[in-house]
Amino acid sequence: MTGGRRASGYPWLASLLAGGFLLGLICPAGPASAKDLLVPKEQSQTEFEPSVGPSFDVQQRGVPQSIFVWIKMAKGYEVEWDTFGRKGWYTQDPRLKPIEPGTTVFPPDAPAVYIVFEVAPLEDPAQFSAQWFLEEADGKIGSAPVGKDTLEVPGHERYGFLELKKPDGGWKTGSYLVKIYVTPLGQQPFHAVNQVGTMRFKIAETAASTNGTAPK
């Protein structure tokens, strides 16, 4: 009974003691020495070192290439329509045929370089993206991409292409590295963890003209 009266008779004292006890647990040396153990920092870079993905330039029959059935660098593409086995009955997924597949050297006046591909049937829509970089004189890859392209492929489609357009200032002669990314819709398309492979091409004065080969 006595203990009960003291607790109920002096509620301010109980609160004061409880508050002082909790403060002692949180800041045992006093408020002046309190430290934030988890200081938030901005992440300025998503990859701590250059990532190296498999090269899609050399493809072997029967060897898996990420989710690609095949992927080719080309001067352009043509559209073909599959049928359901009966002439005139077309699917909603056009088949893309690369023009001069395997071409890796292009002239400076090329309007674009194309990467044409077929993937295994997708259960969900996905983003296919590319960044291309100019190789510097010392063999290092430039830190800033020359250009970017992203294509959204619906779940029922299997074919697509990435268009590496000529920069505003024109192509510089030299070697280029292309990084290929595959991500679900809504995710950051160019994050290092989503890189699935690389391809290379060159811009050279001796390359044949591509006028008329790119699709309109």
Image: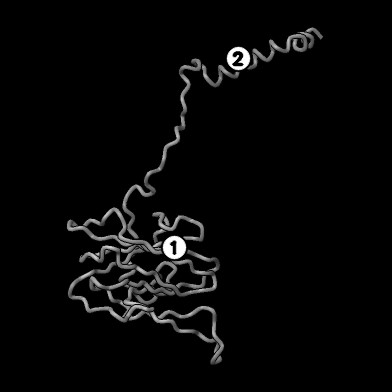
Q: Residues within 10 Å of mark 2 (few under 14, many from 20)?
A: few
Query: As drawn, is 190 to the left or to the right of 205?
Result: right
What type is the residue that disc 1 sits on? Val
* Number of the label disc, if any, that sits on residue 182: 1
Q: Residue 200: image x %, image y %?
A: 28, 67
Q: Would you identify the image quadrant in which residue 172 lies?
A: bottom left
Q: Residue 185: image x %, image y %?
A: 51, 60
Decide: marks 1, 2 in contact (CB < 8 A)? no
- The residue wearing badge 2 is 20
Q: Determine the secondary structure under disc 2.
A: helix
| 64 or 171, nearer to the observer | 171
Total numbered badges shown on the rendered structure: 2
Given the current orientation, which residue lies at the most extreme bottom position? 87
Position of the C terminus, as image quadrant, is bottom left
| 62 or 176, nearer to the observer | 176
Q: Residue 23: image x %, image y %?
A: 57, 18
- Residue drawn at 35 percent across, 72 percent down: 114
